[in-house]
């Protein structure tokens, strides 16, 4: 298993450094503005041999691919079979979203759409402690400027996104 080290970068973001089984290291700097810098180091190397920058959306898409959201290796088919249709998305509530001013319970997300709201991040106060609500209840009301982290079956998620966002 890979060793992961985490470091705060005050005024910049966070750095995660992963030592791989083969001795190589990958460092990821997540900036507060959302972009990521990725660096690749050879064993016992002080200088990165490669690096690149991803914006927030690119990083999330790449993370989904690496995490197996799009393709499950055959060796993992049995393990992944139970969650093969699971989709996790980060969705932005816009001014024109039909869910504005409506609650989770009113929309019947779990009952009608088989969708679970894992968390809601209020973009206006993202850096504050109260900027995120984990596992909001049925009375939680959606507002513009929030980012929803939702999970559900792929087909139901697609329908929800088309109808509600």
Image: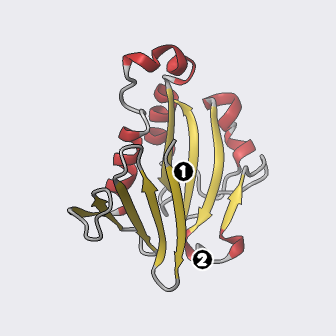
Residue position marked by numbered label 2 in the rendering: 127
Residue under the image location 42 percent in, 33 percent down: 69
Left or right: residue 149 compared with residue 52: right
| Label disc, if present, on residue 26 of the rendered structure | none
Callouts 2 and 1 close, C-beta under 8 Å = no
Q: Position of residue 14 (x, y in %)?
A: 49, 71
Q: Who is closer to the viewer here, 63 or 138?
A: 63
CA–CA distance between discs 2 and 1? 27 Å
Label 2 secondary element = loop
Rendered residue at 54%/66% (across/down): 6
Please determine whether, in this image, residue 107 is positioned above or below residue 129.
above
Residue 145 visible to the viewer? no
Foreground residue among 103 and 137: 137
Task: Kindly tell me whether residue 10 is visible in this rendering.
Answer: yes
Labelled disc at residue 98 = 1
Residue name at image x 31 percent, y 54 percent? 58
**Residue drawn at (71%, 55%) of the image:** 134
- Name which of mark 2 and mark 1 comes first in the sequence: 1
Asked which secondary structure carries label 1, the reply is loop
């Amino acid at each position: 298993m890979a060793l992961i080290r985490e470091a705060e970068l005050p005024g910049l973001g966070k750095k995660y450094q992963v030592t791989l089984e083969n001795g190589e290291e990958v460092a990821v700097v997540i900036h507060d503005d959302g972009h990521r810098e990725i660096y690749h180091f050879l064993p016992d190397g002080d200088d990165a041999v490669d690096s690149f920058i991803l914006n927030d959306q690119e990083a999330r898409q790449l993370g989904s691919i690496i995490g197996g959201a799009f393709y499950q290796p055959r060796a993992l088919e049995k393990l992944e079979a139970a969650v093969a249709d699971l989709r996790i998305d980060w969705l932005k509530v816009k001014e024109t979203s039909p869910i504005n001013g409506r609650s989770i319970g009113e929309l019947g997300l779990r009952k009608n759409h088989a969708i679970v709201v894992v968390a809601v991040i209020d973009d206006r106060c993202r850096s504050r402690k109260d900027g995120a609500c984990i596992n909001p209840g049925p009375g939680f009301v959606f507002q513009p400027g929030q980012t929803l982290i939702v999970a559900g079956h792929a087909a139901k998620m697609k329908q929800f996104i088309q109808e509600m966002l």
